[in-house]
Image (tube, helix red, strand yellow):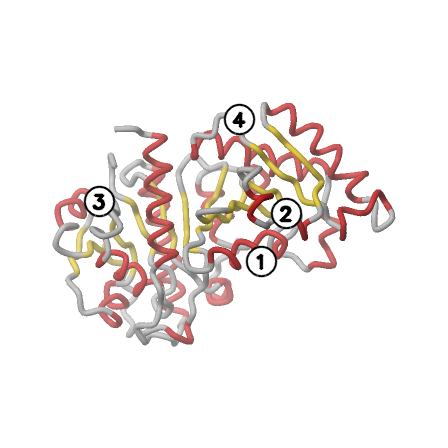
């Protein structure tokens, strides 16, 4: 990699510090590139007895990585207790995210990996974005409708058109223009970050049996089908609308590179069923590469040496692979 990866630790009371430390322990076995943590060094030390190197910039991290986990320290001056989130900890996570985004934007880091945060805690310290995805997009100068959240595992990639909204609100929020915007971002992301020259995109329907020709709802006819026709102008193979209950078995998955889903659970349930321990959340449409493990803070098991690092390892590997395609050696 031309530069190391920047990893925002997330909430210091969650499992982020533990899974980052465990990923460093497995750096050689997993052939991970150089990375450094940004956040509370005390949070890492509270859950891990391995070597830490406090560094001030990515160049120092490269020199330290072979023998210690490099950490650019964000200090809020309060004790960190695993499993017990605090407002100081939320502010630490916020500050760490801000710094890590800046390092990726300035190309001091080759990509950004974000650890899990508590939205409720962040909102209490003034965080005004729906999630980290929207925050990173704003800091990169990209409008929210120009980015897309991709969930990716070894055998499946899904992109939800609507995300953190009530299910009853989804039909009113769906428009042809929104589906086209998310579909275009997905197609271009597959081409740019994954090297797929002519992406294959499968679009899900909203209703059971994709509306059954209008008998079970007209959203497929009035909204989804016009979007598919427009997306076919992107030099991509776009199919659908497909019945969501048949889209995710192995034979069907072999026929597409990503599934464009219309609401949160339609995208996340199959991904987490297949790849609970190695699923990655990736933001498409940014000028930088950003990934995250596809799980939350898991406060209930923080500090108990029970957190599995597989998703963090997958997020680091995917970030490195995508950054390598953008800046090949």
Q: Using the numbered discs, state the Cα–Cα distance from disc 3 to disc 4 in whole angstroms.
A: 36 Å
Count residues near mark 2 (Cα–Cα under 10 Å), then give few for <14, some for 14-19, many for 20+. some
In front of the other: 325 or 176: 325
**Are circles 1 and 2 on residues that touch, CB within 8 Å?**
no
Give the mark, 1 or 2, whose residue is nearer the N terminus: 2
> Could you say where residue 148 lies in the image, as x and y percent from the top left?
54, 42
Q: How many marks?
A: 4
Q: Residue furthest front?
A: 251
Q: Which mark is residue 247?
A: 2
Q: Using the numbered discs, state the Cα–Cα distance from disc 3 to disc 1 in whole angstroms.
A: 37 Å
Q: Which residue shows up at 55% across the image and 36% down it? A: 186
**Are circles 3 and 2 on residues that touch, CB within 8 Å?**
no
Count residues near mark 4 (Cα–Cα under 10 Å), then give few for <14, some for 14-19, many for 20+. some
Is label 2 in a helix, a strand or a loop?
A: loop
> Could you say where residue 57 lies in the image, as x and y percent from the top left?
21, 46
Is label 1 in a helix, a strand or a loop?
A: helix
Q: Which residue shows up at 72% across the image and 45% down it? A: 205
Q: Which residue is mark 4?
A: 198
Is label 3 in a helix, a strand or a loop?
A: helix
Q: Residue furthest right?
A: 215
Q: Which residue shows up at 32% across the image and 41% down it? A: 320
Quadrant containing the C terminus in the rendered view? top left
In this rendering, is residue 115 above or below 235? below
* Residue 22: quarter of image: bottom left
């Amino acid at each position: 990699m031309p530069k190391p990866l920047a990893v925002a630790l997330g909430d210091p009371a969650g499992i982020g510090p533990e899974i980052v430390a465990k990923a460093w322990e497995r750096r050689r076995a997993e052939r991970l590139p150089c990375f450094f943590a940004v956040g509370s060094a005390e949070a890492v030390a509270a859950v891990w007895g391995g070597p830490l190197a406090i560094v001030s910039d990515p160049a120092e991290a490269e020199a330290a990585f072979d023998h210690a986990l490099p950490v650019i320290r964000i200090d809020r001056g309060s004790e960190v207790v695993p499993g017990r989130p605090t407002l100081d900890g939320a502010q630490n996570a916020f500050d760490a995210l801000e710094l890590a985004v800046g390092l990726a934007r300035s190309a001091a880091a080759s990509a950004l990996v974000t650890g899990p945060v508590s939205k409720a805690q962040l909102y209490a310290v003034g965080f005004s974005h729906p999630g980290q995805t929207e925050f990173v997009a704003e800091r990169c100068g990209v409008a929210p409708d120009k980015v897309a959240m991709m969930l990716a595992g070894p055998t499946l990639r899904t992109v939800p058109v609507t995300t953190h909204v009530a299910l009853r609100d989804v039909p009113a929020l769906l428009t042809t223009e929104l589906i086209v915007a998310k579909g275009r971002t997905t197609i271009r992301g597959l081409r740019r970050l994954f090297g797929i020259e002519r992406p294959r995109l499968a679009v899900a329907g909203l209703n059971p049996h994709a509306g059954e020709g209008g008998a079970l709802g007209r959203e497929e006819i009035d909204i989804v089908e016009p979007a598919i026709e427009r997306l076919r102008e992107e030099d991509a193979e776009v199919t659908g609308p497909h019945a969501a209950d048949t889209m995710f078995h192995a034979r069907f998955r072999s026929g597409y590179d990503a599934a464009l889903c219309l609401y949160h659970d339609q995208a996340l349930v199959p991904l987490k069923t297949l790849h609970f321990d190695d699923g990655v959340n990736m933001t498409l449409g940014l000028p930088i590469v950003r990934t995250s493990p596809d799980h939350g803070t898991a406060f209930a098991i923080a500090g108990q040496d029970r957190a599995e690092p597989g998703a963090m390892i997958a997020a680091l590997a995917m970030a490195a692979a995508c950054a390598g395609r953008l800046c090949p050696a």
